[in-house]
Image: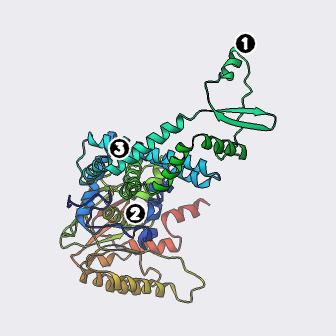
Amino acid sequence: MNHDLPFRSILFDGTETGADIDAREAPECFKDLNLDQIVASITAGRDEYDLKPFFHAPLSRVETIRYRHDILRDIEDQALSGLIAGFAKKMRAMRSHLAQAGKLHYERQKQGWFLDAVDAYCDAVGCLARDLAHADLRSRGFLALREYLTAYTESGDFASLLAETQKLKADLSGVVYCLHIEGNRLVVGRYDSEPDYSAEVLRTFEKFKQGAVKEYRFDLSSGPDMNHVEAAVLNMVAQLYPEIFSSLEQYCRRRSNYLDGAIRVFDREVQFYAACLEHAERIKRAGLPFCYPTVTGQSKEVYGREVFDLALADKLTREKASVVTNDFHLKDPERICLVSGPNQGGKTTFARTFGQLHYLARLGCPVPAREARLFLCDSLFTHFEREEDLRDLSSKLENDLLRIHDILQRAAPDSIIIMNESCSSTTMTDALFLGKELIQRIIQRDMLCVFVTFLDELASLSDTIVSMVSTVYPDDPARRTFKIVRRPANGLAYAAAIAEKHRLTYECVKERIAS
């Protein structure tokens, strides 16, 4: 990172930018991999920051991913996370004041709310700059932010903004006036050492007080907006103190663009990190691991220890249910995990896990694993089974082939493909032929792939293919372990699929006998 460049983003290190971030839409793979559920869970409760677009923009450089990892490690420190939370609270108050000012009817009241907003901003920025000056920071992002905030808060522009804001607050707090009410007539005048009759009344009635009494206080105000009487009083007070209120009016015009662009961006972007860490911490409390993976764009030798489907884990941990983890590894020349085994055994979950790990790694997020080495792909493609649309005159197989053709047209050697029981809607002979053709094209392009299938024979096509099998308990084949292990297939996956289709599985037969 060039330290001569001004700080612009806590998410992007300068080599990659988020200039068009809000125009990004969720990638096509999101729904298949349940990434939409994961992002919804991570960003829950932070709607005001509109964080979802950040999850739609995966990174393309290992250096930027490391930049984010270092920032996350800094924020893991409770002292720093507390500073960030305090800053966010004050900035939230600032936005609340601005929003309220926009809703009000009377101009002088709007000016008061605007002044409070700027006061909250100055407090938030000043406190953060002072606190970061003494914080133990390691990441380039926070070090650059600290340098930027120090220069900003010591600048003449901020100093004058702070001084002017504080003077106006002090001047307004010193405004004292008297109200003379007689019938329907109300007169506003300057305070001239008149006695405080409210204190006199309280002292007079104090001698009649006998023990605790029930209070009958009630709030006359129905909201923050003034009524016409209050507004009229304020206008008369402004006439009594013309210099102060004229200064306030000019202040609001001159300081309309008080908010620094980099600080505004930081206030939003830092919530990406806070949301990721808070979500991961909740899952970790259930005993599941997270790690910062080693990410490389050079080697396709990947592995994961104790990996799990984050969307499923989120659901199961809320239900106090256990989560099964798995391991995988691919060493050169291995590129394809061919996953077979009985239905409902965790094959699709494993495929999703592989995809989630690589997508989250591209975001610079912690990933659901004890340890992981992952490939920085350029794109992640998925082909999962779709429900038939009765309005579509094409066959299901034809639609599958069109979608697969589109993926192969766009995929490159650095892409990752997740195929989940593709072409399963045809006969075994045709499915085997299509599967071989598809795998040959994936092998030719040297792409990483997870291929879920009931066609065990495909595992023997090449030494680039690794057979992985979903397992059952040896003493009860009807019970799935949801463990996916690296071993040769037993050749029974297709038979199991046929038995499932015709309700001839162990469970179905046992159910029939019982009934």
Residue drawn at 61 percent across, 27 percent down = 192
The residues tagged by marks 2 and 3 sit, at their Cα atoms, a distance apart of: 24 Å
Relative depth, front residue between 178 and 50:
178
The residue to which callout 1 is attached is: 209
Percent across and percent down for residue 189 are 66, 34
- Do tag 2 and tag 3 residues touch (Cβ < 8 Å)? no
Q: Left or right? Give the position of 321 relative to 80.
A: right
- The image quadrant that residue 32 belongs to is bottom left
Q: Quadrant of the N terminus?
A: bottom left
Amino acid type of the residue that numbered disc 3 sits on in the rendered structure = Leu
Amino acid type of the residue that numbered disc 2 sits on in the rendered structure = Phe
Residue drawn at 22 percent across, 75 percent down = 464
| Dot placed on the residue nearer the N-terminal end, 2 or 3 | 2
Percent across and percent down for residue 297 are 22, 69
Residue drawn at 40 percent across, 63 percent down = 55
Percent across and percent down for residue 310 are 40, 57
The residue to which callout 2 is attached is: 54
Residue 321 seen by the camera: yes
Relative depth, front residue between 504 and 432:
432
Residue 287 seen by the camera: no
Q: Quadrant of the C terminus?
A: bottom right
Q: Left or right? Give the position of 237 relative to 246.
A: right
In front of the other: label 2 or label 1? 1
Q: Secondary structure at mark 2?
A: helix
- Do tag 1 and tag 3 residues touch (Cβ < 8 Å)? no
Q: Say which mark, if any, is on residue 128.
A: 3
